[in-house]
Amino acid sequence: MKVITRVIASCLVMTLIGCVQVNSEADYSALKREQLASSSVTDIEKQYEQGSKFTVSPVYLYSAKLRTEELEKVYEVYERAIVKRLNDAGYHLSSGAQASDFVVGFALALEADFSDETINEQFGVSPGLTVLEDLEKGSFLIYIQDIESHQRIWRGAVQGFVHEELSPVQREQRASRIVDSVLSQYIASNR
């Protein structure tokens, strides 16, 4: 009986040892590169019912790295992601003649152009993603402002590392993931 127990125990140990997987430095670096940090704050308790109308207002920040045309393309990707996420939550993008209930403003910033300190001073919310050597940090800033009172209701920020090599489809997917990571915080608090 002891022999059978030892054989089974030995087999179990060998199986477990064979299943141990050590991540390489490249795997670890890739995981860090995909990291996102998000934060949000509610400024005023105001709820918008499903069916409420919104407009989107991009705020273009200066970029030393990107040309205006490149910047506009990136902003378009994020605007589509915002509209889709809010539509999925039951809100409706206002068309030209329709009055909106709230405005969704957003901006994109590279670490080289806007440090965490600057974002904190000017926007008041920064997730504080750690800077990693050889990776460029970017920030997605978003806020919701009430049309009637002109007061900011909510604001959020997401930080991650820039992925220049992504295909257009991958860029859309990443933008959706980033927008969803922070807008889901607002939508959850607005129910």
Image (cartoon, grey):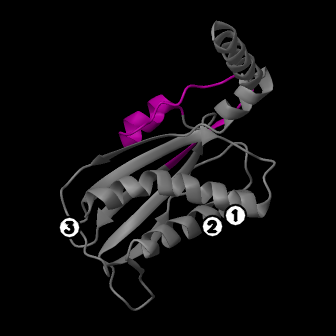
Q: Secondary structure at mark 2?
A: helix
How many numbered dots are placed on residues in this image?
3
- What residue sits right under mark 3 in the picture? 149
Q: Secondary structure at mark 1?
A: helix
From which residue to which does the magenta span run?
115-140
Q: Relative to residue 14, is residue 98 depicted above or below?
A: below
In this picture, residue 117 sits left or right of residue 146: right
Residue 92: percent from left, percent from top? 40, 80
Q: Residue at x 73, y 22 (%)?
A: 15
The label number, if any, that marks residue 5 in the structure image: none
Residue 22 visible: no
Find the distance from the CA under tag 2 to the CA under tag 1: 5 Å
Q: Relative to residue 63, is residue 120 depicted above or below?
A: above
Q: Tell me the amino acid under the disc marked 2.
A: Glu
Depth check, mark 1 against mark 3: the one in front is 1
The label number, if any, that marks residue 73 in the structure image: 1
- What residue sits right under mark 2 in the picture? 76
Quadrant of the image for the N terminus?
A: top right
Residue 133: percent from left, percent from top? 70, 22
Q: Quadrant of residue 134?
A: top right
In this picture, residue 75 sits left or right of residue 128: right
Residue 155: percent from left, percent from top? 35, 51
Q: Secondary structure at mark 3?
A: loop
Contact, mark 2 vs mark 1 (Cβ under 8 Å) = yes
Residue 54 visible: yes
Find the distance from the CA under tag 2 to the CA under tag 3: 27 Å
Find the distance from the CA under tag 1 to the CA under tag 3: 31 Å
Q: Tell me the amino acid under the disc marked 1.
A: Lys
